[in-house]
Image (cartoon, helix red, strand yellow):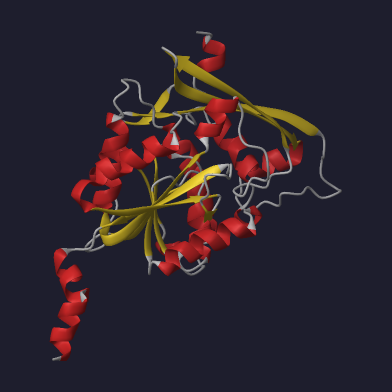
Amino acid sequence: MNDAVYRTRSLGVAATGLPDQYADGKAATVWNVYVGSTQARTKLYRESVCHLLRSHGCRNVLDVACGTGVDSIMLLEEGFAVTSIDASDKMLKYAQKTRWARRKEAGFDNWSIEEGNWLTLPEADIDFPSGGFDAVVCLGNSFAHLPDFDGTHSQQLLALQNFCDALKPGGILVIDHRNYDAIIDTGRAPSGANIYYTSPYVDNIKTSVLRVDGEPSMVTLDYHLLVPSDLLRKRRHSDRASTTPTESEDQTKVASHFRLSYHPHRLQKFKSLVAESFGEEFASNDVLGDFEKYSKEATPAYYIHIVKKKTSEAEESSSSPSSKRRKVE
C-alpha cells in the first residue's frame, strides 16, 4: 500500500475513538472555501432540506456533523432551533466565530455548539430536549468519515444507535452519503452538478478506491482548488466572506489541496445498517437521490435517507382510527 496515496489527511484525534481528518487545520480552512458561504448553497439543497424538516413537523434539530457550521447556519436562518456538534475543534472554530459575529440575530444567541463524538453522543455536553430532538441531521457525506477497520461496522452501528436514541418517538434522522456504488463500479464520482456545493474554484477532484481482499475498503478524494489569495485569507476569518473577490483585491490564484478518506457505503448495505441499528424502534427509511424521488435507473451523486423512529405505543394508540372513534363516542 502506498501511504502517500491512501493515508487519511490527518491522523489526529479530536475526541476519543473518532479520527479527525481536519486536525491539522489545513483541510478545515480550504474546505471552508470549497463549501463557500452559507448563501452559496444551491437553492435546491436549501429548499429540500428545510421542506423535508417542516413536512415532518421538526423544530428542534441536532446537527451531528456541524463542521464549519454550513448546515447549522442555514437552518438557523430558516427559523429552526439548532444544537451542533462535531469531532473536529478545527472545524468548529469557524462555526463559533460565526455565532459570535451574529449573536444579536434571532436564534444565533441560543445556538449551542459543542465538540462531540458520535460514539459517545449520550455523554456530550449538550441539552437534550425533553423526549428527544425532532430531527438529527448528518449531511455532507460526513458519516462516511467513520472508518470500519475491523470489517464489522460495529462503530457505524453504535453511532446510528446513538442518533436513534437522541430522537424523540416519531422523530427523523436525515443522513446522506455519496453514491459509492457508482464510485466503486466506475472508479470516479458521478458527473453532473453538485447540489451541495457551488464553489467556482474547484480545479479537480481525484478519486482512489482501495480494495482489501478484493472488497472496497476506502475511497480517497484529493481536492484540488485554485483560490484567489485574498479570498483564502478572508475565509480563514469569516464564514460570510464573499465568494467573489473585488477588483481591488489580489486575485492571484493559489493552488490548494487537501485529502479526505471515506468508508464507501453501498446503498443496500447502508439501508440494512440503519434498520439494524434502530432495531425495534425502526419505522421506515425513505431514500432520495439528490433530493429527488429515487429511481434505480438514475445515477445520483448523493443518496439521502430519511429514517423515521417509531412513535410510542401511547401515541400510536391515541392516533389510531379506533381510538379516535372511541373519543368521539
Q: Nearer the viewer, residue 142 or 268?
A: 268
Q: What is the count of numbered marks?
A: 0
Q: Is residue 65 left or right of residue 203?
A: left
Question: Quadrant of residue 155 in the image?
Answer: top left
* Above or below 4: residue 327: below
294 horizontally vs 35: left or right: left
Q: Does residue 10 appear in this view? A: no
Quarter of the image with the C terminus is bottom left
Vertical side of 173 occupied by 144: above or below: above
For the view shown, which residue lies furthest in the right direction? Answer: 247
Q: Residue furthest top?
A: 1
**Is residue 194 in view from this perspective?**
yes
Q: Residue furthest bottom?
A: 329
User: Is 49 located above or below residue 139 in the figure?
Assistant: below
Front-lying residue, 59 or 47: 47
Could you say which is closer to the camera, residue 326 or residue 281? Answer: 326
Locate residue 65, reporting x and y percent. Answer: 43, 45
Q: Residue at x 44, y 34 (%)?
A: 266
Q: Position of residue 56 (x, y in %)?
A: 39, 66
Which residue is at a point 59% across and 38% down the rendered structure image?
Answer: 31
**Residue 27: horizontal and vertical position, in percent?**
56, 32
Q: Is residue 137 left or right of residue 178?
A: left
**Could you say where residue 144 lies in the image, as x and y percent from the top left?**
44, 34
Residue toward you, 271 or 169: 271
In the rendered structure, the answer to whether residue 188 lies left or right of residue 55 reads right
Which residue appears at 35% of the width and 21% of the height?
A: 149
